[in-house]
Image (cartoon, grey):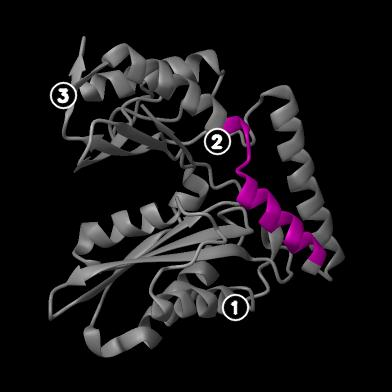
Amino acid sequence: MREIEAKQITETVAQMCIDANCYLNPDIKRALEQGLEAETNDTAKDVLQNILKNADIAAEEELPICQDTGMAIFFVKLGQDVHITGGSYADAINEGVRRGYESGYLRKSVVADPVRRGNTGDNTPAVIHTEIVDGENIEITVAPKGFGSENMSAVKMLKPSEGVEGIIDFVVSTVRSAGSNPCPPIVVGVGIGGSFEKAACLAKQALLRDVYSKNPDPYYAELEDTLLGEINKTDIGPQGFGGVTTALGVNVETFPTHIAGMPCAVNISCHVTRHLTRTL
């Protein structure tokens, strides 16, 4: 049994919130640069150049890449041989969010009630997904999610008879409906299977993958390529001004499901697609 102090979690999370918001992931930067090379639309090129320039300035000045520093979403793999001392697990994460958003001068966007609103003032509570795994480590992934893109996401309970064609139609139509709202070029996470809520979690988790990674199942790796190609034919382009770079990547995750269903979720992320992982 390994003991980890709650304050260590808090300190780690606080810095992760700042770093995730200020530094563009290398795979996203590379994809943006490749999009710039591939574009023939002058306006699209100009937009991509400005996006890359903005990311460079954010890193140099340690400032947020985007003014919407998101709701703090966590995916945690908690080793079953870990004992947290000096405080509770969830409180430690939320305190880290509180400190990180305060000391990093990050915008606080969380309201206390979904209908009656009222800003909590510190960007808490965070959304925390926890998986108990073997071992004595804690792997923490933070994925700050802005709602310009989150609002464009969707879940559909497809019938099995709709097949892969139904999945393709749903994903592409969701992106078409989103248009310029999610600040393209986007990254698209697709979750297929499980239940209503499982599909949504799969889609969110898909966004944590490198945009150059492939689903280990060749069938779904091919589906990822097909979806990316179809989305980039929409001519939405960077920031909605047209072009061939509507999406930087499409990642598909799956889970077994019921014989009567084929849930499908699409979680859209903006060109920033922030996520960061640390292991304690």
Element under disc 2: loop
Q: Which residue lies under the disc numbered 3?
A: 1
Identify the disc placed on residue 68: 2
Residue 113, quarter of picture? top left
Residue 99, quarter of picture? top left
Of labels 3 and 2, earlier in sequence is: 3
- Using the numbered discs, state the Cα–Cα distance from disc 3 to disc 2 in whole angstroms: 40 Å
Foreground mark, 3 or 1? 3
Residue reaching furthest to the right: 42
Q: Are marks 1 and 2 in contact (CB under 8 Å)?
A: no
- Crowd around label 1: few <14 · some 14–19 · many ≥20 (10 Å): some
Front residue of 262 and 210? 210
260 horizontally vs 190: left or right: left
Q: Quadrant of the C terminus?
A: top left
- Using the numbered discs, state the Cα–Cα distance from disc 3 to disc 1 in whole angstroms: 49 Å
Q: Main secondary structure of the magenta part?
A: helix
Foreground mark, 1 or 2? 1
Task: Tell me the residue at 16%/34% (across/down).
Answer: 80
Percent x, y of residue 135: 22, 36
- The part of the chain drawn in magenta is 21-37
Q: Which residue type does callout 2 highlight? A: Asp
Identify the disc placed on residue 179: none
Q: Which residue lies under the disc numbered 1?
A: 229
Q: Is residue 1 above or below residue 272?
A: above
- Using the numbered discs, state the Cα–Cα distance from disc 1 to disc 2 in whole angstroms: 29 Å
Q: Which residue type does callout 3 highlight? A: Met
Percent x, y of residue 208: 45, 50
For residue 271, say whether it is visible: yes
Percent x, y of residue 9: 34, 20
Task: Tell me the residue at 68%/74% (across/down).
Answer: 235
